[in-house]
Amino acid sequence: MIETRSASTALNKHKALQQFFKWLLLDEGEIDRSPMERVRQPKLPQKLVPVIRGDETTKVLGTCRGREFAQLRDEAIIRLYCNTGARLSEVGNLLLDDIDLTTESVRFHGKGSKDRRVRFGPRTARAVSRYLRARAKRKAADLPDLWLAERGIRPLAPNGIKIMLKRRGLAAGLVKLHAHRWRHTFAHEWKRAGGDTGDLMLLLGWTSQEMPRRYGASTAAERAQETHQRIGVGDHV
């Protein structure tokens, strides 16, 4: 599977098989020994996901200029990803009730049924407000889902957002644009500003200390150089 798919796919299958045979062994008593007992987990190489620079996000947002429904919707979606660092599914599965423009915040339904509330800035609030006014005029306005498809009475699914981002990225001259790049960018900018790691974990919905180290890793050297220049170790000897 590593040769034909990917290491991450093989790791997921390995974990699933481990749990399946553990269930057969401990809960059901159907087997005396798990065949996964000596099968090691496949090593997962770390992929350095490049962050999105500010001018690149500006170019993507530039493809959303206009007053058409899809333009207003897509700008609001992109600004939420950029401003909150949320996962693709977290923004994609938002309900209308999850948005609070009074406090300029959004309630995300994260992994493991863990909800969290994250604030967003005035530009995102304005984009979301404009989208909500346009949404109210749609035939599908009574749906509980926040994001509506451009055609038909149906919501815009996370996979539809994934396709939209790729299309907007290509229009802006960016290849392989996806929501997770803004998540890495959020972590990078937070660390760059000297933000607390514990606060970052709360905002991005992490429980593992490994995640802050992994995200924004592609620009770790850049942050180290900036810190070195600011501290100036050895410059005053």
Image: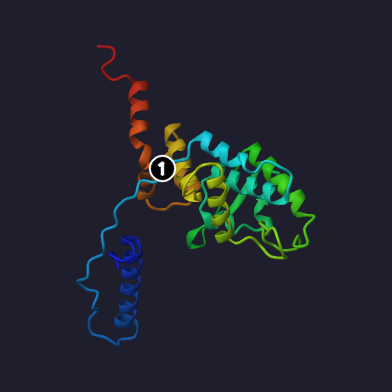
The colouring scheme, among rainbow, by chain, secondary structure or one colour, is rainbow
Q: How far across and down, in percent of the image, does residue 40 sit?
A: 22, 66
As rendered, which of 135 and 32 lies closer to the eye?
Answer: 135
Q: Nearer the viewer, residue 188 or 156?
A: 156
Q: Which residue appears at 57% of the width and 47% of the height?
A: 168
Asked if 2 appears above or below 206 in the picture, the reply is below
- In the image as oriented, which residue stretches furthest toward the right? 137
Q: Residue furthest top?
A: 237
Q: Work out which quarter of the rendered image holds the C terminus and state it.
A: top left
Please, is residue 217 above or below residue 178 in the view? Answer: above
Please provide percent x and percent y for residue 107: 60, 52
Q: Position of residue 129 (x, y in %)?
A: 72, 45
Query: How many numbered callouts?
Result: 1
In this rendering, would 107 be left or right of 40? right
Q: Quadrant of residue 82?
A: top right
Can residue 135 be seen here? yes
